[in-house]
Amino acid sequence: MGVKLVYIMAHSHTRSFVDWLRSLDQQALAALLGARPDALAPPPPGITSLAERLLLPASLRRAVLQAHAFDIALLHVAASQGAEFSPIVAPDLVQSLLPILQREAPEITTQRVATLVEQSQEHLAQLGLCMNFSEGMMIPRGVMSALPSGLEPAIAFEPSQLQSQLDGLDQKQRAIIDTLNHGGGTGTTRDAAIDADPQRPIPQLIAKGLLLRINEHTVRLPAMVRAALRGLTPAAPTLLPPDNWPPVYPQDLAANDAATGAGLEIVRLMRTVIEYLGQHPGVLVKSGALAQRTTQQLCTALEIDQEVLAQLLSVAVAARLIARGEPQPLPASDTGGDYLAPTSQADAWMTQPMAKQWAHLLESWWLQANWALWLIGTPDAKGQAHKIFSADTILRDLPQRRQALLEAAAANGGSTKRIEQALAFAHPILALNISTEEIEAQLRNAMWIGALGPDLAPTAQLVALIQQDSVLPACEAATPDPVEYFIPQGDMTVLVPGPLSPKIEAELKLLAQVESPGLASVYRLNDASIRRALDAGRTAAEIKEFFHRHTLGELPQAVGFLVDDAARKHGSIRGGAALSYIRSDDEALLQEAIRADSSHRLGLRRIAPSVAIAQVPLVQVIEQLRAAGLMPVAEDDQGVALDLRPAPSRIPLAPAPQASSTQPSIEAALKAIEAGDALNRAAEHASTTTPSSAKETLGLLRAAVRANQQVMLGFVDNTGRVQRILVAPVDVSAGKLSAVEAATDKVEHFPLHRITEVGQIQG
């Protein structure tokens, strides 16, 4: 009998949730679906289906993460008064919450608490975590189970005070705390009653605020105490909202020069790391982490430390510019393992304007970057230091935590403590799992990429990310226009007064060495850099023409002399494929080239005064002669210089899946719910015909076409199952029915012999 009674109550309560959902207007239902997007796919075929999805434990666990501290306190107080069984009126909730809030703010008034209760009920209803009836507030079953234990309103400690309290416990008290912590946080005892002996350990712990009295037989560890026992020091949870609540984010922010400089420096570094890894793919250890030697090589090549490298690679992977896998072509010293190398998408990114490059990095970082960078270098479970890309440093919910933290920073910036307190109120469940180290690392990371200014001030880019707007306009407004000129000096330095366009920058990097990187940069010309450009197929005339076209003012004569001097000897030896050959009008120089093959690895043999052939591919001939100090250049069959530099390695990458293409819209979900409910009503009240009266069925379908009337249609699908849908017939001919399905607004075709019933909607 007892089991049957429980079943009836649960069924009745589920119907109450369905009835409450059905009572919502379209605007309120749309707001609920917007807050619970996991209920949208596929579009729910009716309110009953929607209710079942919203009450799934996994869906509820995601929903409670959006509840703020006062919401959770209200849920606990309402549940203690029986809100899971019957409605609780607001005045009773206010009277229960008033003494709790007075511990935090003694001056708080009943009216203020009543306002907070009303606002919280609206917020919880939008999340589908409470039902507001005219008789009072109810809590759907499963909501309280989705909340982590220990979140009941408790004494709020500052982290240092809490640790001091724990350190000051005697042996018995500490044993009780540790036992409860290892046993799930909740325990039963005879000392939990209000009139229990105050000298006993349990009443003493309750008085200190280190235990919660649930009832006269049950106690529970507060969530903040459990976090402290895990070594975390979250900010004290406050039940009263911060001053800027609901959060209002600053609009029309002026460009933050420091943040812009930081962000565009990341763009420059990203281009550099793509170029470097394209020529030298990074070696990975078997676990998938970046080898320490590769880490050191990258830090040296980019002139950055390991923390910046980890941040850079994390964003690069999130942006799908770099990946782990098998690059093509493989390195010459391939050992059979995976590498870190640019993807096939990196080339398109490299050609984009700087503002668009920065915007792509920001959006990818905000939504996808999930490496716990603050753990790199700390010991893992085996006592070995975490490396970049160690599996243990991946946190799946890190983007969600980053977004919550930076939302608090955007609305309450300027002070780390204010940000922590705002986070503890707005996202108390997330905040309990975020360490001080993570908060500091995340804020540094946001300043590094240009989402926050050096003083933790929000930028226009961060506000756009929070509001799910395109961040590109803010990046374009902040990014200086690219320059197409530079200033060569007589000392062979080249001053660049601003960011160059990608094409000009790539050419200048070929001709000169970067000496001082940044938005305003300095390059240096020398014999080796000019020879590098000549090796790549540039001629002296083309190099000087490039300098003349992009030089501000006059080109110093010394630069022209340097180019001419390097070109005078360059290309005196010409090579081609015979298997390969070399030629030179200078017979003495050709003989010197033959003598350079002292080991006879090339098999050079003179076949004419100015021509010699080799027994190896041309690229090997060119490499060995250059190593011997000569300056040959490759040519094609027309005598045009060739660039024999190896193609950069790339990892083929499939296009990223588009979430928008699979996630139904709120409008589609509302239409499906409406169509599903209409179908259910039609099934209950429709007069139906069956294949035994085919003439009547055809007549009803044709009448529906003429009247543009919806009908309930039963049919056998391709799998042999009988389906019921709501349709508006548009044509009956050629042995089939063409009709618009109400849930999707799409025209579907149904063979007449598969139709099992037609329901005429009454009223």
Image (tube, rainbow, N blue to C red):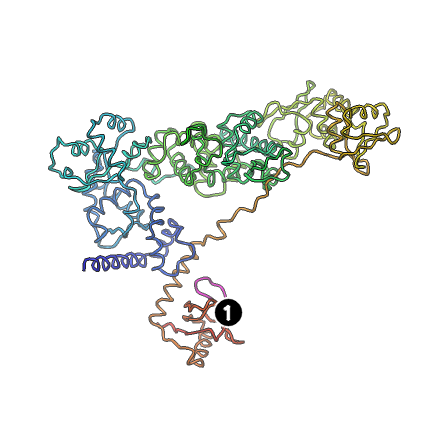
Q: Which residue is labeled 1 in the image?
A: 749
Looking at the image, is 354 positioned above or below residue 566?
Answer: below
Q: Residue at x 27, y 58 (%)?
A: 16
Q: Residue at x 38, y 67 (%)?
A: 679
Observer able to see residue 620: yes
Counting the numbered discs, the total is 1
Q: Quadrant of the N terminus?
A: bottom left
Tell me residue 87's x, y (percent): 22, 53
Q: Residue at x 81, y 37 (%)?
A: 578
Q: Which residue range is magenta in the image?
A: 738-750
Where on the picture, by quarter, is residue 298?
A: top right
Q: Observer-nearest residue: 501 or 756? A: 756
User: In the shown orientation, is residue 508 left or right of residue 411?
Assistant: right
Tell me residue 437's x, y (percent): 39, 29
Where on the picture, by quarter, is residue 711?
A: bottom left
Kindly report the secondary structure that dominates the magenta region of the rendered protein.
Answer: strand
Tell me residue 264's x, y (percent): 54, 31
Q: Quadrant of the C terminus?
A: bottom left
Residue 749 part of the magenta segment:
yes
Q: Observer-nearest residue: 115 or 713? A: 713
Tell me residue 124's x, y (percent): 30, 47
Looking at the image, is 721 positioned above or below residue 135?
Answer: below
Secondary structure beneath dot 1 equals strand
